[in-house]
């Protein structure tokens, strides 16, 4: 990677030089969920990262003249790591939701995606509370999809997992009846040999803006207003100069920004 390296420790706060408009890049520790989340963030055995969100981070930080250091954090601990100052930003497909906005600030969105249900082929399962009643529904823990399932599918038997890959594996193995996840993260599984063999998309879930929010944003501490402005300007720039579209075409055959 050109702009990112694995974080090995050390402080990484935004220095006052940024406020003075210094030419040199400032270091920002960017929290990414340690668990793989293809096609957005995927680590290899050597600790190198790839994926749509990594390329997006690279472009945004280059535009903003920031030296961004990838810092893997367990997903369920990533907001506490931000508020405690262990990282400076979160770029890990985090939905902008009212509950999260009580703790942290967000930039404007940089993509959005609806939730969807995938089930075994021929199951006749539909993305409704009635259809999922009594069914074992898999979901990644501490996600908006878990919140959605708990609210809208109360009679399903919810089974949580640390990673999306584990959800996919259990659906393939027949240990769960269906799963709920973001459409764009389900696509690689459904295009894989296992996904093609076992499963199918049965539909998007009904919209709930109180849970899913307006989209995915960069998470920041509430008092880091200058860093928020810097990132927002960079997001606008990479969308306007064509970089966003160029990156997206490498991973998707549709626009993931949304309305």
Image (spheres, rainbow, N blue to C red):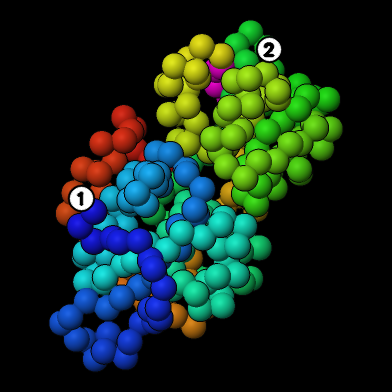
Whole-percent x, y for residue 172 in the image: 59, 20
Which disc number belongs to residue 124?
A: 2
Res. 233 visible in picture: no
Q: 232 or 66, which is in the foreground?
A: 66
Query: Could you say whether the residue bearing mark 1 is in a helix, strand or loop?
Result: helix
Q: Which residues are magenta?
A: 199-203
Counting residues from the start of the chain, the first of labels 2 and 1 encountered is 2
Q: Residues within 10 Å of mark 1 (few under 14, many from 20)?
A: some
Q: Residue at x 52, y 71 (%)?
A: 82
Which disc number belongs to residue 243?
A: 1
Looking at the image, residue 93 sits to the left or right of residue 144; the answer is left
Give the position of the C terminus as an image quadrant: top left
**Residue 245 on the magenta segment:** no
Does 236 appear above or below 86?
Answer: above
Q: Residues within 10 Å of mark 2 (few under 14, many from 20)?
A: few
Looking at the image, residue 27 sits to the left or right of residue 108; the answer is left
Residue found farthest to the front: 46
């Amino acid at each position: 990677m050109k702009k990112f390296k694995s974080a090995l420790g050390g402080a990484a706060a935004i220095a006052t030089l940024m406020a003075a408009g210094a030419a040199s890049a400032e270091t920002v520790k960017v929290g990414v969920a340690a668990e793989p989340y293809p096609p957005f963030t995927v680590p290899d055995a050597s600790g190198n990262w790839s994926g749509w969100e990594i390329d997006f981070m690279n472009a945004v930080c280059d535009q903003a003249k920031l030296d961004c250091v990838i810092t893997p954090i367990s997903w369920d601990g990533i907001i506490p790591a931000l508020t405690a100052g262990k990282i400076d930003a979160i770029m890990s497909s985090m939905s902008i939701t009212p509950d999260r906005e009580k703790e942290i600030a967000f930039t404007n969105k940089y993509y959005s995606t609806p939730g969807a249900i995938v089930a075994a082929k021929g199951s006749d399962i539909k993305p409704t509370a009635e259809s999922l009643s009594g069914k074992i529904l898999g979901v990644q823990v501490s996600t908006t999809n878990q919140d959605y399932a708990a609210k809208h599918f109360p009679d399903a038997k919810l089974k949580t997992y640390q990673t999306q890959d584990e959800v996919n594996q259990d659906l393939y193995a027949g240990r769960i009846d269906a799963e709920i996840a973001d459409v764009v993260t389900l696509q690689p599984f459904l295009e894989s040999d296992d996904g093609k063999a076992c499963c199918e998309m049965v539909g998007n879930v009904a919209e709930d803006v109180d849970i899913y929010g307006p989209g995915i944003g960069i998470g920041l501490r509430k008092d880091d207003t200058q860093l928020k402005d810097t990132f927002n300007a960079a997001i606008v720039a990479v969308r306007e100069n064509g970089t966003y579209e160029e990156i997206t075409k490498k991973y998707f055959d549709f626009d993931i920004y949304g309305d």
